[in-house]
């Protein structure tokens, strides 16, 4: 059995989703089985399990509407960047990595959600190089707006350069500051949003959620989409297997589940995407 992965972005990116991690582990078990000469029946069973898992993401990529040229360009620029060098050189204020980018499937999902909800004012918390911001902007009408929050000026500028070559880029306004500061400013200005996408500091998700619901940033009937709500499986793995971020996500998920002001569903897409509706 040959294990291949044709997509250049996936060759170098380390797995950051429960499925990606599971597939990597199965790949190691398949190889180990060959070395240790296990029974052909067991070898064949683990190869089938590997095949089932490994085929899913490439298939989703294949049958999902292809991304625009502007999104493909943004993805390429993000992968070309040497993020660890940029951090060592002091260009980025945070340690960033290409794996942070949401990408094709999640971008198309968010774009579809914007069409379905008819949202015109969107708040993105955690922009990075702007893949999700631009994907959502592509679904907005001309008078729609995405306010994208990002603490790192370098990545915000990289995103801005990519937005400027898209016909939808002018719908995106970037605020460079800590997300909490920006959200407080927006609330003080009386700004409201119909849709918010949370994707910044996992340990601050609870604060973003409270600011949206308690400070009036999210309109009644509005939606919050939350990325990484499975956090590589740590949300449901035993507490001793969780990192600080895993703990934060598990607590955040429970807080949302216990909140009678909303209804929600956690979609097992990529690293988990929770859809929350304010009642
Ligand atoms: C996972 S990435 C966002 C990915 C992006 N949504 C996409 O689709 O490509 C998280 C981003 O949030 C930013 N971030 C982290 N903590 C932040 C904070 N406290 N305030 C504002 N931005 C923050 C990071 O600099 C990083 O660029």
Image (cartoon, rainbow, N blue to C red):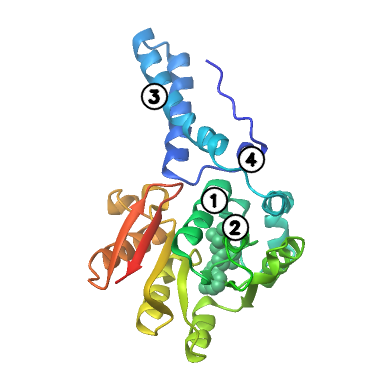
Residue name at image x 52 percent, y 85 percent: 186
> Can you tell which mark lies on residue 262?
none
Give yes or no for contact between labels 2 and 3 (Cβ–Cβ under 8 Å): no
The residues tagged by marks 4 and 3 sit, at their Cα atoms, a distance apart of 23 Å
Secondary structure category for the residue under label 2: helix
The residues tagged by marks 2 and 3 sit, at their Cα atoms, a distance apart of 33 Å
Q: Please rate how many residues cluster around mark 3, counting C-alpha atoms within 10 Å: few if below 14, some from 14 to 19, many from 20.
A: some
Is 210 drawn above or below residue 119 in the view shown? below
Secondary structure category for the residue under label 1: helix
Residue name at image x 67 percent, y 53 percent: 71
Q: Nearer the viewer, mark 2 or mark 3?
A: 2
The residues tagged by marks 1 and 4 sit, at their Cα atoms, a distance apart of 22 Å
For residue 38, side relative to residue 158 (left or right): left
Q: Nearer the viewer, mark 4 or mark 3?
A: 3
Residue name at image x 43 percent, y 17 percent: 33
For residue 192, side relative to residue 46 (left or right): right
Give yes or no for contact between labels 1 and 2 (Cβ–Cβ under 8 Å): yes
Quarter occupied by residue 250: bottom left
Of residues 214 and 94, the one nearer the viewer is 214
The residue where tag 2 is placed is 135
> Can you tell which mark lies on residue 49?
3
> Can you tell which mark lies on residue 12?
4
Q: Please rate how many residues cluster around mark 2, counting C-alpha atoms within 10 Å: few if below 14, some from 14 to 19, many from 20.
A: many
Q: Please rate how many residues cluster around mark 4, counting C-alpha atoms within 10 Å: few if below 14, some from 14 to 19, many from 20.
A: few
Mark sitting earlier along the chain (4/3)? 4
> Can you tell which mark lies on residue 108?
1
């Amino acid at each position: 059995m040959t294990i291949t992965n044709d997509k250049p972005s996936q060759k170098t990116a380390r797995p950051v989703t429960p499925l990606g991690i599971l597939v990597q582990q199965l790949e190691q078990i398949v190889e180990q089985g060959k070395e240790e000469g296990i029974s052909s029946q067991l070898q064949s069973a683990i190869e089938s399990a590997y095949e089932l898992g490994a085929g899913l993401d490439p298939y989703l990529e294949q049958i999902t509407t292809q991304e625009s040229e502007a999104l493909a360009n943004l993805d390429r620029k993000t992968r070309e960047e040497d993020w660890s060098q940029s951090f060592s050189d002091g260009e980025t204020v945070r340690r960033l990595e290409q794996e942070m980018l949401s990408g094709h499937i999640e971008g198309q999902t968010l774009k579809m959600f914007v069409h379905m909800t008819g949202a015109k004012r969107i708040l993105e918390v955690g922009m990075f190089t702007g893949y999700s911001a631009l994907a959502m902007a592509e679904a907005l009408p001309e008078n729609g707006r995405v306010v994208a929050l990002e603490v790192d000026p370098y990545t915000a500028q990289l995103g801005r350069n990519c937005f400027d070559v898209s016909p939808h880029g002018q719908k995106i306004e970037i605020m460079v500051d800590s997300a909490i500061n920006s959200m407080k400013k927006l609330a003080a200005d009386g700004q409201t949003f119909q849709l918010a996408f949370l994707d910044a500091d996992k340990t601050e998700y609870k604060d973003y959620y409270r600011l949206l619901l308690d400070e009036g940033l999210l309109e009644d009937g509005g939606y919050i989409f939350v990325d990484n709500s499975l956090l590589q499986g740590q949300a449901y793995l035993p507490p001793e297997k969780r990192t600080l971020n895993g703990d934060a996500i598990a607590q955040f998920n429970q807080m949302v589940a216990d909140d009678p002001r909303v209804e929600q569903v956690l979609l097992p897409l990529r690293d988990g995407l929770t859809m929350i509706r304010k009642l």
